[in-house]
Image (spheres, grey):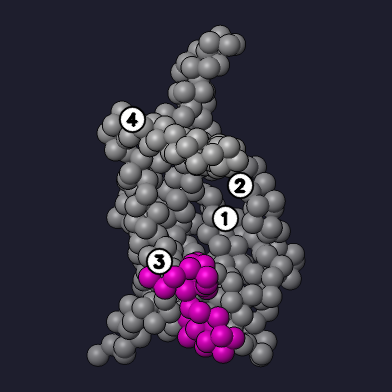
Amino acid sequence: MDRPTDPPHPDPPDDDLDYRHRSGRVHYSAHQRGVDATALGQLILLLPGTLMSLLVLLLLSGGLDAWLGVPLWIPPVVWLASGALLFHRPTEDLLARHLLRLHRPMPDEYARLAPVWREVTARAGVDGRTYELWVEDSDHLNAYAAAGHIVGVTRFALDHLPSSQLAAVLAHELGHHTGGHVWTSLLGCWYALPGRAAWYAIRLAVSFAMAVTRSFSWAATAALVLVIAALTYSTLTLLYGLPLVLLVTPYLIAAVGRRAELRADRHAAALGFGPTLAQVLVAMHAAETASGRPSLAAAGASPHAPGLLARLLSTHPDYPTRLHRLKPYLEPTR
């Protein structure tokens, strides 16, 4: 879903969900998970960052080989293989508990979640036991699809959303999993870490060097600027301009992220949750408007960023756009 927000739902949740699969056999789809066009686009856009990280590791491996005799190929191979840990259940458990601050559902929470989750997964033809349900102690409406099998919701959603709206939220998160959006994004972030760390270290070093030379004279600062410019040009030439691609990829990744949200909305609507998902989005938009918070802040962008930049870097579409895309699922069939 979106970033945390707190729409007004003063009444306790009603069990208003149409349980079409409360009893009887559930037919599972032959292919329960895949990689849709959005997930494939994420993988392609994250490739430059991965290549830069690989280059950083190769440079570090050269040092380890010279100093400790570690073969050049070992660090990159170990790093590439480490991506599999993101789908390792115990690793996912640590991720959910310590990074996302989630906990396993208490008995009352599980009693609330389980039948709704079973109905959602049954409509999708998915084995719900593949995924792990988690809860966040939060007073905001939010939900998560993370790692390979994590589906989380906030305590606010459990306490205040009617079952039909809770099902719509869960169906949206399931759409992220079945479309491959979650694992492609997570792998991309993981494999980009060495490159980002190197870039951060370079920025710190350059800032420190500029501060030191500035204390001497403007000539020393100018000389340093020329040296940095020469090194930058040499690096760009040597790497065929690959670092320049990294400057635009955040905007492209954000655009693909917005497409992923619309696809997850469509997944929920196709399962019959279009009207209730629209109700959730309308409530979130109304609460956001009443609180005076800009919609882009709740959609994942910084409220302090310029308007155009905020829109380009937002990973979520605004609520009017999402509601507009849901219109075909809201019109009565003839």
User: Mark 2 vs mark 3: which is more N-terminal?
Assistant: 2
Q: Amino acid at mark 2?
A: Glu
Whether the residues at callouts 4 and 3 have beta carbons within 8 Å, the answer is no
* Circle 2 SS class: helix
Q: Say which residue appears at 69% left-offset and 75% top-offset.
A: 139
Residue 24 or residue 305, whichever sits in front:
305
Q: Say which residue appears at 42% left-offset and 29% top-offset.
A: 55
Give the number of the disc on residue 309.
3
Q: Amino acid at mark 1?
A: Ile
Q: Say which residue appears at 61% left-offset and 80% top-offset.
A: 6
Residue 53 or residue 81, whichever sits in front:
53
CA gap between label 1 and label 2 equals 7 Å
User: Residue tagged by mark 2?
Assistant: 92
Q: Amino acid at mark 4?
A: Ser
Q: Residues within 10 Å of mark 2 (few under 14, many from 20)?
A: many
User: Residue tagged by mark 4?
Assistant: 234
User: Mark 4 vs mark 2: which is more N-terminal?
Assistant: 2
User: Mark 4 vs mark 1: which is more N-terminal?
Assistant: 1
CA gap between label 3 and label 1 equals 31 Å
Relative horizontal placement of residue 19, taking residue 103 as reference (left or right):
left
Residue 176 or residue 132, whichever sits in front:
176
Relative horizontal placement of residue 303, taking residue 250 as reference (left or right):
right
User: Residue tagged by mark 1?
Assistant: 150
Image mark count: 4
Q: Is residue 37 magenta?
A: no
Rendered location of residue 72, percent (x, y): 47, 16
Residue 152 seen in the figure? yes
